[in-house]
Image: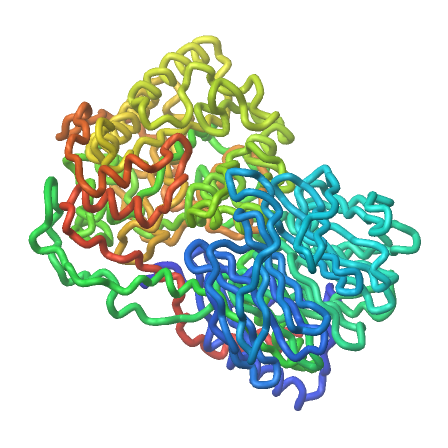
Amino acid sequence: MTRYLKFGLYVLLAGVFAYGCKRNTGSGDKAEELAIYKDLSSKRINLPNGWSLTPVGRSLDLDDLPLNLVVSPSKKYLAVTNNGQSTQSITLIDVASEKVLDSAVVAKSYLGLAFSQDEKTIYASGGNDNKILVFKIENQQLVPADPIVLGKPWPVKISPTGIAVDDTQNRIYVVTKEDSALYICDSKTKNTIGKLNLGAAAYTCLLSNDKKELYVSLWGGSRVVIINTETQKISAEIATNKNPNDLLLTKDGKFLYVANGNDNTVALIDLTKRQVSETLTTSLFPDAPVGTTPNGLALSEDEKTLYIANADNNCLAVFDVETKGRSRSIGFVPTGWYPTAVKTIGSKIYVTNGKGFSSKANPKGPNPNLSKVPQQVGPNPQAYVGREQYIGGLFKGTLSIIDAPSAQTLSAYSRVVYANTPYTKKKELNAEGEAGNPIPMKVGDKSPIKYVFYIIKENRTYDQILGDMKEGNGDASLCLFPEKVTPNQHALAREFVLLDNFYVDAEVSADGHNWSSAAYANDYVEKNWVTSYGGRGGTYDYEGQKEIAHPRDGFIWDHALRAGVTFRSYGWFADDGKANIKTLEGKYCPTFEGYDLGYKDIDREAAWEKDFDELVAADKLPRLNTLRFGNDHTSGASVGKPTPFAAVADNDLAVGRFVEHLSKSKIWNESVVFILEDDAQNGPDHVDAHRSIAFVAGGFVKRGFVDHTMYSTSGMLRTMELILGLKPMSQYDAAATPMWRCFSNKPNAATFTSKQAGVDLAQKNVAVNTNSRRSDQFDLSVPDAIDDLIFSEIVWQTVRGEKSIMPAPRRGAFVRLEKRGDDEEEEFDQD
């Protein structure tokens, strides 16, 4: 994958020391540390969001998104539950040989996993089938047994999460996230013998040593509840920070560790006093904004060392916890992408990496040497018809097996973790840029741009729209909606700035609308969208509908409110005549239609024009204006619905008319328009499935400029924040490159003229075929309540012909950076 922006290596020694990382100063020790550091650095893998990986240890391949890892009582076995979008399974691993013994594919699963005390049985959450899967371990194989049924399958809302087993009483304790309950089941009869309302969605549960108490983390309740197992009632509630998830009990049963996934912290609860006695900050820098996502906990055998899986920092945080109340950070261990669980056995550390880490070739991916001719209508006779390798398989989870590091090794590991992390406190306060540019480099500095307009669209890759533009890095053979269909987006790219190296941070709309509005998707979002997108039940509640899915500090409107920046939203996080979040109440346009593929985007644009003109005339135009034009999602091949051409052309014309109207207003020279897709929906792109279209227009925006800089969703948000005087919302926008290169220090008052599409906007799907029948079965009332790969294939075949083969998504996320020079050694000498 081509990279236009070289990521410099920097190691913040001060940050390591601030956290108390032990280092030896002898020349031999330092040489060993340098050797480890240089070896890992030479293997660095770059991600499309600007962060990097250098996973250490040995590894085993797993299935999609492993969420939980448990150790059998004798420490003979490990078990993993894989809960991703495609294959879900339960994996049994032999600890001694470090080999997979068996993997049982299941229809539905989710997080909960436990061994019986005699190690003859494994219990696993059956996800939205609302049952507990039971496997007997026979001859080191997983043999399915009759499940424990909690209720009827989805759409009945139960959804079991954490599981705890008390073999002495034949009890199985199950907590749930949809009906927020504790189910108490008899492991012999497999009947439910008790149920308790918990008041909020639960993550997991853990029994006390004497089995008299059950500790439950309320994922959606910011607290841990303690349940008396004899009375089956809540005996205590202890407040935590946002989204408590994993729990860990000390051997003496006196202390309970709680990871707070939405807060960069781990709480230590004194169970005798029933209160938090200490809070550990797990991020790489003190007072970092949200974005670390601790979600896994493990203690060393002697319980002097605590390991914390930081999902969004791609590392383990390591703490010396020998003295309770005086814990101190001693370093970090690099892991794979999105570590979800950590366990220890002896001197080994086991980590499940939710998104894996492997840098694998894609020899059968989309072939750039095939036809470059964009097809307007019908099948492409020159299209490659072979079955291409699905590079999405590169995101399979992995299990890392890491030897507990020595002091020297941990110091080297820590340095590597800092080098992998583009976020720094310095970047948070002072962004990249140039003097005199309209984009300030420091939060709070004034910009000549007063008004920001932010348009969210749906699901297109770069090549799908702009692959036919010779000025950029495109592949015309993958261009589904060329200039004839999207003349306005082509004109914006040509007249203002062509961005051919822009990447969305998200995979799908569920996390996409969170990344696009907050530069972060919390652990609830990341661990749940895969369920519904895999056709395993669940609701679409990722646009403000559920507080559990909210980032800790809210969305961009919340940040604007706290900063005194006025705002208004048009059809985004406001649907069906109401705001989805409290902050937008009274601050959205009631005449602007929300997500509805049956309503034209050009009509939405007309509603915006009327509202805009009234606000400008009254001198009440807010500084931040967010809009949603979503019809480029399309309705696929659904009979009677707009064809993909008509839907995308409608969307394109709405965008063109919007920019034209704004450019002819009196505030044009004080305004800027940012346009992006919430995600790229796994569509064809010859560079990467995350690469997408993005546009910038306005009085201070350069004209006729091609910018090859690598930008991201978070980088676009960072640019808006700097204009408006907002602090970064997360570590991701704080670390991202602002789009200052797109701007000139002198305004250009020239207006934009919208273009009519070369296709009929009233064109409807009429053919009854396989794809129309598939499309008719989809729920298109909310974004992406469908399998995104299947839907992308339908759109492709509707445009190119029913028998044409859609190129598999290319994921160029994994790129080994070139070997650096002696500057690495010099950085070691700075201390």
Judged left or right of residue 368, residue 13 is: right
Total label count?
Answer: 0
Residue lying farthest to the bottom in this orientation: 28
Q: Is the N terminus in the top left, top right, bottom left or bottom right quadrant?
A: bottom left
Instruction: Name the foreground residue: 681 vs 416.
Output: 681
Residue at the limit of the structure toward the left, as seen here:
381
Please indicate whether residue 174 sits to the left or right of residue 538 in the image: right
Q: In this view, does 150 lie above or below 592?
A: below
* Residue farthest front in this picture: 189
- In this view, the residue in front, 106 or 486, is 106
**Residue 264 visible in the displayed image:** no
What is the x, y in percent for residue 300? 74, 74
Asked if residue 342 can be seen in this view, the reply is: yes
Task: Residue 68: give x, y in percent of width and height.
Answer: 60, 62
What kind of colouring is applied to the model shown? rainbow
Q: Is residue 721 left or right of residue 812?
A: right
Quarter of the C terminus within the rendering: bottom right
Residue 96: image quadrant is bottom right
Q: In this view, does 22 lie to the left or right of 523?
A: right
Tell me the residue at 8%/55% (across/down). Answer: 382
Q: Residue at x 38, y 46 (%)?
A: 741
Residue that appears at 45% across and 29% down: 452
Q: In which quarter of the image is residue 205?
A: bottom right
Is 100 situated above or below 183? below
| Residue 733 placement (x, y as % from top left) | 52, 47
Q: Which residue is drawn at 36% across and 71% down?
A: 360
Residue 289: x and y, percent?
Answer: 63, 48
Q: Name the foreground residue: 22 vs 100.
A: 100
